[in-house]
Image (cartoon, rainbow, N blue to C red):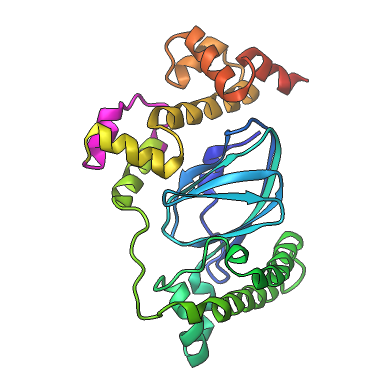
């Protein structure tokens, strides 16, 4: 079962002295096109290692297909969302890293030349490094070793993780820096991104609220037509499809974690008509609400 809101909240980093965190996401029995990562953003870098299954991630409106064994790098500040590509389990590890982790290196001129431009956002690694240069596949052992340290947490694991991640960033910088100009600023991949972030924050505050397309469009300063086009480009879904998907995930949590009746749950997630709720739940979850509740009891 997937807790979308928990995935979003987990982007925070708990330890300021060692600002990195591991989230091992295990999404079971997913339906094709079902959301595995809630639309969100954060200031940190995120490295995703696909362990099982495959997924489609939209990162600032650009789609990326990721299969088992592949790694993607999500730049800080970008809006991103993910969906299962096929039915079945989707497992992936997510490593969230704040650039403050490497403050010890800020007076190192080599670090400043090669790694700092990426950490500061002046240039960006490719989202799929190994697709741009197959040499990068050999670097991923460093990331896997860092994940193992974070998962097991042996003594002084923080120092090992820090060294592994810095080596990874350095090798990636060595590979891609000659192709880029450090002095060239990287512009936003997605126009109106900041306005969309504010809209997302409002939807998260009340995911079952009844915000219309017109109201959502007004929040980002667009007419409904252009808003719908941009939202679809950003998420791969229409606004209504995306909101309904979030509501059905909320309903899934309530079905399996509360004693509310199906009619009460329908009302909780903004569906006044129980029959319509049943139709939506079956569309998004591949089963009726009664069957969804039965999964818990089974």
Residue 290 x/y as whole percent = 65, 13
Q: Quadrant of residue 76?
A: bottom left
Residue 82 x/y as whole percent = 54, 44
Instruction: Specify whether 284 is left or right of 139.
Output: left
Is 213 covered by the magenta stretch?
Answer: yes
Instruction: Find the magenta span and give its range.
Output: 204-221
Instruction: Specify whether 10 is left or right of 231.
Output: right
* Residue 113, above or below 176: below
Residue 42 x/y as whole percent = 45, 56
Residue 193 x/y as whole percent = 33, 51
Q: 291 and 279: which one is in front? A: 279
Is 278 covered by the magenta stretch?
Answer: no
* Residue 225, above or below 159: above
Of the 4 image quadrants, the one containing the C terminus is top right
Q: 212 and 57: which one is in front? A: 57
Question: What residue lies at 77% left-to-right and 68% top-to-bottom?
Answer: 154
* Residue 248, above or below 9: above
Question: What residue lies at 56% left-to-right and 24% top-to-bottom?
Answer: 284
């Amino acid at each position: 079962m997937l807790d979308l809101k928990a995935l979003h909240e987990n982007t925070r980093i708990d330890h300021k002295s060692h600002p990195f965190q591991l989230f091992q996401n295990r999404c079971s029995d997913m339906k094709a096109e079902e959301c595995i990562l809630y639309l969100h953003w954060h200031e940190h870098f995120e490295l995703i290692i696909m362990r099982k299954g495959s997924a489609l991630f939209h990162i600032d409106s650009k789609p990326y297909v990721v299969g088992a064994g592949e790694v993607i790098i999500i730049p800080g500040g970008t809006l991103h969302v993910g969906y299962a590509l096929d039915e079945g389990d989707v497992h992936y590890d997510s490593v969230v890293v704040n650039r403050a982790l490497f403050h010890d290196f800020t007076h190192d001129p080599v670090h400043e030349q090669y790694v700092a431009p990426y950490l500061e956002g002046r240039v960006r690694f490719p989202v799929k490094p190994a697709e741009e240069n197959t040499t990068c596949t050999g670097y991923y052992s460093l990331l896997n070793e860092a994940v193992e340290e974070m998962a097991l947490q042996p003594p002084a694991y923080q120092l090992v993780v820090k060294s592994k991640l810095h080596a990874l960033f350095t090798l990636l910088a060595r590979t891609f820096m000659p192709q880029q100009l450090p002095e060239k600023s990287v512009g936003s991949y997605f126009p109106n991104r900041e306005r969309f972030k504010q809209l997302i924050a409002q939807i998260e505050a009340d995911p079952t609220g009844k915000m219309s397309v017109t109201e959502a469009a007004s929040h980002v300063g667009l007419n409904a037509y252009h808003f719908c086009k941009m939202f679809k480009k950003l998420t791969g879904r229409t606004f209504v499809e995306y909101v309904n998907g979030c509501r059905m995930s909320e309903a899934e949590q309530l079905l399996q974690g509360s004693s509310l009746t199906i009619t009460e749950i329908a009302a909780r997630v903004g569906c006044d008509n129980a029959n319509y709720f049943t139709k939506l739940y079956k569309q998004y979850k591949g089963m009726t609400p009664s069957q969804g509740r039965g999964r818990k009891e089974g």
